[in-house]
Amino acid sequence: MLKNFQSFSQSKFSTSEKPSLQAGFTLLEAALGALLLAAFSLMLLAISSIVLRGLEDGRDESTVAAQALLFDKSLRKVCSRVQIPFWQGDFRLQLNAAAFSCNYLDGFADAAFELKQLEAAVQLLENGTVQNFQAVSLVRIRPLLDSDIVKGLIFEYRIHDRDFSTSALFSGYSLRMHDDV
Amino acid sequence: MMYKRGSATLQVLTVLLFLCALGAAVTVYVLNARTLGRRIKPEADNADLFRIVSSVAALLAEPSASGADTPQNAAFTYSEPGYGVSVRELSSLINPNWLSISIVTESNMAKLMSSVDAPYLLQQSRFDEGISLNIGERYSDYFIKEAFDSYLSPFSYLNIDVVDEYVLERVVAECSGDAAAAAELRQRVRRKRESLLPYSANELVQLFGVYNRELSVFITNEAQWNVNFIDPLVLRAVLAYPAFQLENADIIAATILGARGSSPLTVEILQNISDLPATHRLFAWIGDNSWFWEVTVHDQERQLKAILARVLPTSYNDLSLLNPVIQLIQWEAGDYEFD
């Protein structure tokens, strides 16, 4: 009786410990899982590709933006130093995309700032100091007019095929009409 | 039973995977949106400070009952909550660009000069090197340091009857580009001065000739200083100028200084006090109008210092009468520093 029970128990236990095929994944499930994983991997790949491309574009954008910001800031700063006296005197504004100059820097008739277009950069000269702005090309410089009075300058330029424009005011202007500029 | 348990595990895994993918997508989107879509904080454009300057200019442009510009104008007491506003009249100060050497050497204005020779050196320097708005740097060798704080300003129109004739030639040459015409103009002004009569508006137009457009915006026959603002030292110096031959200059000066404290002074009142005819040369120096002001506006952080100018009525551009009579011609914005 006991012997019979032991053999029964052993057979029962051995039967229950044996892994059942139904407890794991079927071939269909495994295949479906693999497909899902593959789809997910592809999705992640696509997303990471988009993100990386976006990051690269963003880095390019930020580089251009930084160059534009630096050039813009320098133009505004130098223009804010121009004080044309109310009697004007010999105010000289040479408007040429290749070589530009404007006098009355800090209120002095013989002090001028200049912009020169080099091969792959623009050079800003003021009071003996020189700044080079790489990848910038001047397109056009024109006076900023208000009621026919020159109150500043509008600079149009390109950086890596992007168009930019900076409108910078002088810190003073003449009472004389400037409709001949 | 076992099949269902396996399926449930697979469903959970799938849902988790999709949730992860969704979370990753949302994270990437939010990160990009925060980086690329972030608004760049605009730099302070000081529009509020410029608006206050415009309000002050409008008050200065309002004609007073007496016709004179006086310290009683509401612009000098203008205020706005949160802002500090101060207005300073500039055209009654001494402009070293135009200053006549004779009045300096023959009056107590000489005490503002750095040396006995300074007036003559100043005259030569202006003729050789020209004039400048930057007087602190340009004329530091010729005036004492205290003069720049209280007595000097580069903002005043050039009065044809009182200006130093050599600087007149220099500045006319600069503005017209015609040195010969400038020398000729100086000679004509010298001859006119010998008549002891001031220029009329028509005579000025004839004098300027083809350069009327260039010169009439800053050369005028309007009196240089406003009797309501002129510094007592300068007033006494002008009245004591030997060429005017005023015997009681000190009494006239004291009467003017006493009277202007209680009521606005006009040229007519000045004529009565001094007992001089309207054509006297004194009234080319002293009148009752102001032409330039400095307006300083600040809040806790920023400051704007602006120069306002009243356009000359004799200006070439007659349309200027239709434009704002008082214009903002110069400004300097920066951080406010509490003293």
Image (cartoon, rainbow, N blue to C red):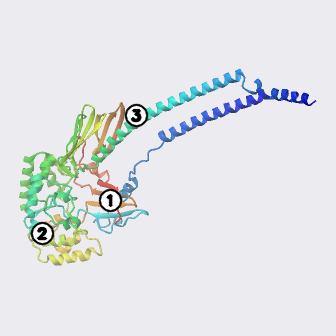
- The mark nearer the N terminus, 2 or 1, is 1
Residue B178 % position (x, y) = 10, 45
How dense is the environment of label 1, judged by Cα within 10 Å: few (below 14), some, or many (20 and up)? some
How dense is the environment of label 2, judged by Cα within 10 Å: few (below 14), some, or many (20 and up)? some
Res. B195 in view: no
Mark identifier at residue B61: 1
Q: Nearer the viewer, residue B239 or B173?
A: B173
Q: Check if mark 2's residue and mark 3's residue have beta carbons within 8 Å.
A: no
Q: Residue at x 9, y 50 (%)?
A: B182
Mark 3 = which residue? A60
Foreground label between 3 and 1: 3
Q: Amino acid at mark 3?
A: Asp
Q: Amino acid at mark 2?
A: Ala
Tag 3 secondary structure: helix
Picture quarter with the N terminus of chain A? top right
Residue that lies at the very extreme toward the front in this rendered image:
A3
Foreground label between 2 and 3: 3
Tag 2 secondary structure: helix
Callouts 3 and 1 on one subunit? no
Mark 2 = which residue? B110
Picture quarter with the C terminus of chain A? top left
Q: Amino acid at mark 1?
A: Ala
Chain identifier of the residue bearing label 2 in the image:
B
Tag 1 secondary structure: helix
Res. A70 in view: yes
Q: Is residue A112 left or right of residue B170?
A: right
Q: Is residue B62 left or right of residue B23?
A: left
